[in-house]
Image: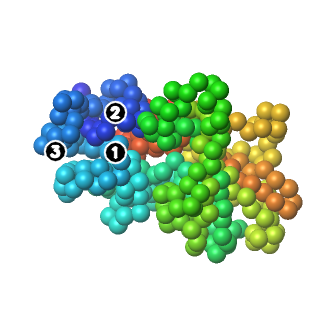
Amino acid sequence: MAELHKVFIDGQAGTTGLEIAQRLSNRDDVRVLEIDPSQRKSPDARRQLMTQADVTVLCLPDDAARQAVALAGDHCRILDASSAHRVSDGWSYGCPEMRPEQRQAIATAQRVSNPGCYPQGFILLVKPLIEAGLLAPEKPLSLFGLSGYSGGGRQLIEQYQAFSDVERDSWNTRPYSLALQHKHVPEMHQYSGTRSRPLFVPSVGNFYRGMLIQIPLFISELRDGTDIKALHDTLQRRYQTERFIEVLPPNNTQLLDDGYLNATATNHSNNMQLMAFGSDEQVVLMARYDNLVKGAAGAAIQNLNLMLGVEESTGLVQ
């Protein structure tokens, strides 16, 4: 019998850590190294487990993740689920579908940064269109994001779940980060191919999990001859062999419920749906996925599988 891959999750008690641990617990090719709860903050105990592990997954706040990397030293392989290192030199960005070479970069890297939930949809929608010349990299872009409240971590989850139904209604859908300095913007800018920082307005909804990304475009600002079908066809060609990316037909009304698009239809899967709706003058590009799976833990499992040299979809539900 082949030796088990050993994985240590530093921060396993957090929202993303629990999701990752649950998915790894059902696998017979991975052993999750457990830390004694009383030693959870012990640098020596944590360093020892990092040294023993084939890969250490960091599910920590940004500052704690930076400290953990320093603690691990140069010889431990790290997959960081925080936003601390997503645009840092020496780190591979953990979005396998971003470009043909990205899987190999992840598989051979000593340091991999798991992508943010919102940036994945933006990057995977925009990058192929810029590379194909349909969308000019100089074009300023706006995007709107809607996520379930689990995207805010344990504190926000506890706030929502402690409310009565009447109290929670007052927190129905709330835009935030209105100073337009959301921490996900740098990776959107760096990896999408756009030359300016996108204007990003996220909102948190009164539901636990699920996510929508919306990017509005004017057809007149795209390359001459571009229409909604050309946008769809470009995305379809780019992702036609991707297991977890589904490009749906343009203006697909079968996706709608009385004209509304549900943010939770892909929940509990690692599937991302890419869509386009609009007219001859305007179009909105959209991505729908589970912020805790494809947006966080599922992306981490994909990256972990690549780093361990196992089939990328192992342990994931499409």
Q: Contact, CB < 8 Å: mark 3 with mark 1?
A: no
**Position of the N terminus by quadrant:** top left
Query: Picture quarter containing residue 261?
Result: top right
Q: Is residue 28 above or below residue 155?
A: above
Q: CA distance from mark 3 to mark 2?
A: 17 Å
Sequence order check, earlier mark of 3 and 2: 2
CA separation in Å, label 3 and label 1:
14 Å
Q: Residue at x 17, y 34 (%)?
A: 39
Nearest the eye: 122 or 162: 162
Q: Residue 43 shows which numbered tag?
A: 3
Judge by depth and name the residue closer to the eye, 277 or 26: 277
Q: Is residue 70 left or right of residue 90?
A: left
- x and y percent of residue 311 in the render? 41, 39
Q: Which residue is mark 2?
A: 13
Mark 3 or mark 1, which has the lower sequence index? Answer: 3
9 lies left or right of 179: left
Residue 146 image position (x, y, % from top left): 63, 45
- Residue 60 disc label: 1
Mark 1 residue type? Leu
